[in-house]
Image (tube, rainbow, N blue to C red):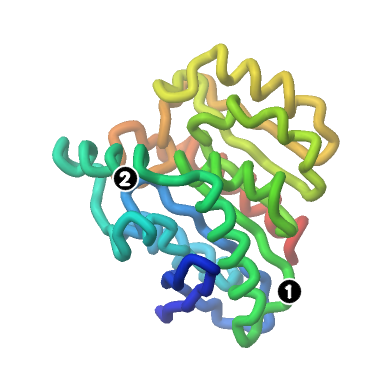
Amino acid sequence: MTKLAVTTPDGNFDAYVAMPETLPAPVVVVIQEIFGVNAVMRGIADDYAKQGYIAVCPDLFWRIEPGIDITDQSEAEWKQAFGYYQAFNVDKGVEDIAATMKAARGIDGANGKVGVVGFCLGGLLTFLSATRTDGDAFAAYYGGGMNNFMAEADNISKPLIVHLAGKDEYIPADAQAVIKEALGDHPLTELHFYPERDHAFARKGGAHYDEVDANTANGRTAEFFEANLV
């Protein structure tokens, strides 16, 4: 594990980096949930490194408090996480992702291609990265609030895969219908619905984790990145 220093006009922040065994390699930028760059996110980055990618997980809450690292295992931490979520500036977050992508392309051994994958808040940020940045492929898991940004769908110019939970407590049926209407026929976008799942079904150790559908979603993402980054 190493760290990458990312520079922005507003200041600098760090990103967790997991390196693959073989270089050169594409980069996958892993976007956090509302709990910071915690053990779950570092584990996801490590898994992508094992798949052959340079995995980079930026500390996007640095403007609030650098180094946030909490879990979803207590009510107090959930309250803390929602406080971070409410304080977070989405537009600045996307700018920070763009800065992370630029810095990651400069890592020794990076081959120039960059994918983005994100979960929950990170899913929303991944979608917005697909509409606002120069990445090569994007994978969004149950992005809360995505329905409010569908006017940007016309800006998608690189492949995007989206995973949605049918019984998502934070993305209700009407919100999912808006997403489906905007992205269902988009030539660069593929949507996958998991009808019986709730929000964060792919978070290992989480209350709604489902191993079968998580493996299905992650397998689809792996094939997607292999097709568009390798």
Instruction: Name the amino acid type tagged 1.
Output: Gly
| 64 versus 212 height, above or below | below
Left or right: residue 70 compared with residue 138: left
| Residue at 44%, 41% in the rendered image | 202
Structural distance between the alpha carbons of marks 2 and 1: 32 Å
Q: Closer to us: mark 2 or mark 1?
A: 2
Q: Name the residue under label 2.
A: 84
In which quarter of the view is residue 153 placed? top right
| Residue at 54%, 60% in the rendered image | 96
Rate crowding at label 1 as few (under 14), some (14 to 19) or many (20 or more) other CA atoms within 10 Å: some
Q: In which quarter of the image is the C terminus?
A: bottom right
Percent of width and height locating residue 168: 45, 23
Which secondary structure lies at badge 1?
strand
Left or right: residue 56 compared with residue 27: left
In which quarter of the view is residue 13 placed? bottom left
Percent of width and height locating residue 63: 38, 58
Q: In which quarter of the image is the N terminus?
A: bottom left
| Residue at 63%, 44% in the rendered image | 128
| 14 versus 201 height, above or below | below
| Residue at 71%, 54% in the rendered image | 137
Q: Mark 1 points at which residue?
A: 112
Rate crowding at label 2 as few (under 14), some (14 to 19) or many (20 or more) other CA atoms within 10 Å: some
Instruction: Name the amino acid type tagged 2.
Output: Tyr
Percent of width and height locating residue 110: 66, 79
| 181 versus 73 height, above or below | above
